[in-house]
Image: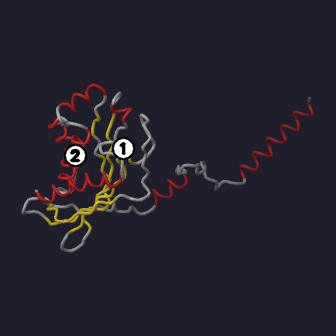
Amino acid sequence: MRIARFVLGLGMMAALAACGEMPGRAPFEAMAGGEVTRASTIQMERAAPVAPIQAPVLQGGMKLVEYEFRVPEALSVSEANLYLPIADIVWRGDAPGNRKQQVAAMFQASLEKARASAPAEGRPVKAIITLHKFHSLTEKARYTTGGIHTVVFDTTLVDAATGAVLVQGRRTRADLEAFGGRRAMAAERQGLGMKVRLMAHLDRVMAAEVSTAGGWRDKGRTLTRALDQI
């Protein structure tokens, strides 16, 4: 027993000596997931401060004169009648067909309305809208639980005269409450079916998105509450 304790003591002394030979080692190491070590934090604090890059601020309103709507080929489509299919595009508001084309037609109709109703004054712009997600309700969800019409897209606004990029790929989420069960049926009887409600919603979203620098994110919540999500 005494011999074992003696060997253990020698091992602890050797470990302490080894630690004393590495005074420059950082007290914390980088971990998976991008966490910053204490050493790197100190180094950043000593470095010269870098001025933040600020995006140009647009003044005044904009006038939509041209638009383009894009649906990336990589977006997935599902026709599965589940409560929540895993896909980028889920749409049942039209007869079975090319869902990407059907969704694109809805956005294009709203963009055309925004262009036709644009005020005479304002900076002429071209809008490039790229769809990221359009996840509506399946039949099963519509006739039972309801849910959310998830609408996500990116907006790029370009000066129509100079081609200068005014807004670069702004990600916008413009969800709408999706009626289900008896509430959905009552809306249908009032002529407010799923597609009618979504089209009215997209009209408001696109009008806001292409008329001001802040787009729907600035106007959307207030406007939607005022209209009670018709």
Q: Residue at x 21, y 68 (%)?
A: 159
The spot of residue 223 in percent (x, y) is: 16, 42
> In the image, is residue 146 above or below residue 95?
above
Q: Looking at the image, how many numbered discs can be counted on the residues? A: 2
What whole-number distance in Å separates the C-alpha atoms at marks 2 and 1? 14 Å
Residue 26, label in figure: none
| Position in image of residue 145 (x %, y %) | 35, 28
- In this figure, which colouring scheme has been used for the structure? secondary structure
Label annotation for residue 135: 1
Q: Is residue 55 visible?
A: no
- Please provide percent x and percent y for residue 57: 21, 61
Q: Secondary structure at mark 1?
A: strand
List x then y, in percent, for residue 149. 31, 40
Question: Which amino acid type corresponds to the residue marked 1 in the rendered image?
Answer: His
Specify few, some or many for label 1: CA neighbours under 10 Å numbering under 14, 14-19, or 20 or more. Answer: many
> What residue does disc 2 label?
199
Report the residue that reaches farthest toward the left. Answer: 120
- Residue extending farthest to the bottom is 162
In the rendered image, which quarter contains the C terminus?
top left
Question: Residues at badges 2 and 1 in contact (C-beta under 8 Å)?
Answer: no
Question: In which quadrant will I find the N terminus?
Answer: top right
Q: Quadrant of residue 53?
A: bottom left
Q: Earlier in the sequence, mark 2 or mark 1?
A: 1
Could you classify mark 2 by the number of other residues whose Cα lies within 10 Å: few (under 14), some (14-19), or many (20 or more)? some
Determine the residue located farthest toward the top in the rendered image. 182
Residue 150 visible in the displayed image: yes
Determine whether the residue tagged by mark 2 lies in a helix, strand or loop.
helix
Please state which amino acid type lies under the numbered disc 2.
Met
